[in-house]
Structure formats: structure tokens, C-alpha cells
């Protein structure tokens, strides 16, 4: 069974459903494997579990937010 894994920040249920659907469809079309053979895993991470440029991502994003 093909396995697709996506890691990122928190996303809502509707976006997860859309991602799973579209990732599965594209992978199925590209590889010629039936959609029902795919397993998709979305791993959500807190912004403080990521870092960029020596800072936690929550701080990076806060610095970029319009004031």
C-alpha cells in the first residue's frame, strides 16, 4: 500500500479532508494505482515545535504579522 505523509502546522478538518482527497487523486493518477490503495497521514505540529533562523516558528510568524 502506498503511503503519503504530510507534516505541517495545525489545519482545520475541512482542509484535511481536501488535502487527503487531492493528494490521493493526484498520486493515483500519476502512479496508476487505485485510490483505495493509498494511506494518507497528516501530522500536525505546534508552531513552537518548529524553528527557523534560530527562533521558534511562532515568533517568526508573529514578527511577520502586519501590525
Image (spheres, rainbow, N blue to C red):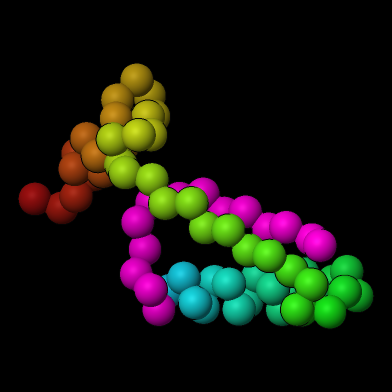
Question: In this rendering, is residue 38 above or below 25?
Answer: above
User: Viewer-proximal residue, 13 or 27?
Assistant: 13
- Side of 57 relative to 40 (left or right): left
Q: Position of residue 27 (x, y in %)?
A: 77, 69
Magenta residues, start to end: 1-14
Q: Quadrant of the N terminus?
A: bottom right
Q: Residue visible at 68% across and 65% down?
A: 39
Question: In this rendering, is residue 34 above or below 65?
Answer: below
User: Viewer-proximal residue, 8 or 36?
Assistant: 36
Q: Position of residue 51 (x, y in %)?
A: 37, 29
Q: Residue visible at 19% across and 50% down?
A: 65
Q: Residue visible at 24% across and 39% down?
A: 58
Residue at the limit of the structure toward the left, as seen here: 67
- Side of 20 relative to 46 (left or right): right
Q: Examine the rendering and report whether any part of residue 32 can be seen.
A: yes
Q: Residue visible at 40% across and 79% down?
A: 14
Amino acid at each position: 500500500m502506498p503511503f503519503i505523509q504530510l507534516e505541517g502546522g495545525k489545519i482545520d478538518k475541512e482542509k484535511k479532508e481536501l488535502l487527503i482527497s487531492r493528494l490521493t487523486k493526484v498520486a493515483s493518477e500519476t502512479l496508476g494505482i487505485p485510490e483505495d490503495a493509498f494511506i494518507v497521514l497528516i501530522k500536525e505540529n505546534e508552531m513552537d515545535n518548529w524553528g527557523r533562523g534560530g527562533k521558534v516558528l511562532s515568533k517568526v510568524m508573529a514578527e511577520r504579522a502586519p501590525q
